[in-house]
Amino acid sequence: MGTNLEVETRIREIQICQHGLVTWAQAKDAGLSRKALRHRLQTGRLVRCHHGVYADAAVRPTWEQQVLAAVLASGETAFASHATAARLWG
């Protein structure tokens, strides 16, 4: 699908917008193979947050990251609501 640098750039762009998170679907669409994902998990470069949601191990975990990881794991129609949404919006 692309060179390693292109794949890495696409994944990094996603993570920048998502508090260091990337879903398996996003990583796959960016060109990452299942084998490459497993390697990143085994070497500690990525950490599994939820089923299908991974965090860059170099990014400090935050409350916002935890919320977004739960939303991403819950599917396209999921969202943070009530007190959580209020806190996110300040």
Image (spheres, rainbow, N blue to C red):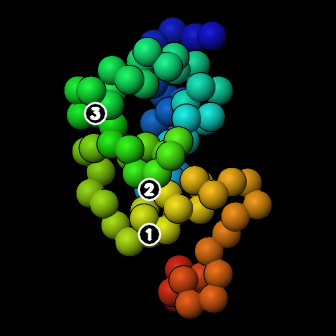
Q: Residue 45 carries which label?
A: 3
Mark 1 or mark 3, earlier in chain: 3
Mark 2 or mark 3, earlier in chain: 2
Mark 1 or mark 2, earlier in chain: 2
Q: Residue 7 carries which label?
A: none
- Measuring from the top left, give residue 9's x and y in whole percent: 48, 28
Res 47 quadrant in image: top left
Q: Which of 71 and 60 is in front in this view?
A: 71
Residue found at x 73% / y 54%:
76
For disc 1, the marked residue is: 64
For disc 2, the marked residue is: 19
Residue found at x 49% / y 19%:
34
Q: How far apart are marks 2 and 3 (CA)?
A: 15 Å
- Measuring from the top left, give residue 65's x and y in whole percent: 43, 62
Q: What element carries label 3?
A: loop
Give, as a three-letter code, the residue at label 2: His
| Circle 3 crowding by C-alpha within 10 Å: few under 14, some 14–19, many from 20 | some
Mark yes or no: residue 81 visible: yes
Mark 2 vs mark 3: in front: 3
Say whether marks 1 and 2 touch (CB < 8 Å).
Answer: yes
Say whether marks 2 and 3 touch (CB < 8 Å).
Answer: no
- Measuring from the top left, give residue 41's x and y in whole percent: 32, 31
Give, as a three-letter code, the residue at label 1: Glu
Give, as a three-letter code, the residue at label 3: Arg
Horizontal placement of 54 versus 39: left or right?
right
